Amino acid sequence: MQKKRVVAAALALCLTLAACGSKAPSQEEVEAAIRDGSVTVQDALDKGWITQEWADSYLEENTVPAADKVAFNKVGDFTTQTLAGEEFTSEDLPSVAFVAFLDPEDEGFADFYQALSDGAEGVRSAGADIVVCVKGDMDAQLFQDPPFSVVAYNDSMKEALAQNDEMASGIPCTGVWYVNGSLISAWSSSLDGETLAESAGSYVSMGQESGGETEDGMAAVTMG
């Protein structure tokens, strides 16, 4: 509660400063606002509210090696079933794929599924693929002749996704890019087939470059 009050005070002071150029907020208030995301580091630097040393330290604390992020989002081993009742395991996942998690009972299901279907040819042409994980009943009537693999999002897959199950299970219809064993992109809760196809090439290239690491193998990715 105290932190919220500090952040609120910082925001109020920022607005006041913008309006009348009065006394700058305290270091504590600025730092709280930056950590809360209400003020950017660059804005605070430009206004002289923080030092370059503090900014460098903050960015270092909130930056992790890409290799660590890839390891954190690695998908474990799992076994599930396809629409036809055939076994589908983690070894069957394409090296680069857009993995969608869909709830057929959600009102956004039809649009999301249509976007996947619209983008399937382009995604495959780029060298990637699509895998649809169904949450709930896999009604064959909803998935007639799908242009991609459709599997059940079962307990085995949930365990394999570990902390990422919160996103996969918590958002009715969502998807994420999977590259060489890990979920690496931001999660998408809305989708456009053309955009999906256009983005596939960059993830294929990333996969070919071993996750896009820099020459020293430690590409930096800012958290957030």
Image (cartoon, grey):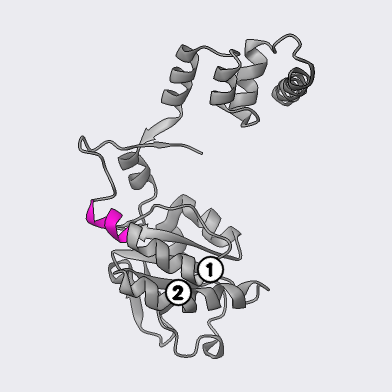
Q: Position of residue 115 (x, y in %)?
A: 53, 74
User: The residue tagged with tag 1: helix, strand or loop?
Assistant: loop
Label 2 element class? helix
Taking the spot 46% from the left edge, 73% from the top edge, the residue there is 132
* Residue nearest the observer in this picture, 27 or 99: 27
Image-quadrant location for residue 139? bottom right
| For residue 45, side relative to residue 2 (left or right) | left
Q: Is residue 75 left or right of residue 104?
A: left
Q: Is residue 200 above or below residue 73?
A: below
Q: Residue at x 30, y 61 (%)?
A: 204
Disc 2 crowd, CA 10 A, few/some/many (<14, 14-19, 20+): many
Q: Is residue 175 above or below residue 148?
A: above
Q: Quadrant of residue 59?
A: top left
Q: Which residue is mark 1?
A: 192
The answer for how far apart the CA atoms under marks 1 and 2 are is 8 Å
| Residue type pointed to by label 1 | Asp
Residues drawn in magenta: 203-209
Whether residue 193 appears in this view of the structure is yes
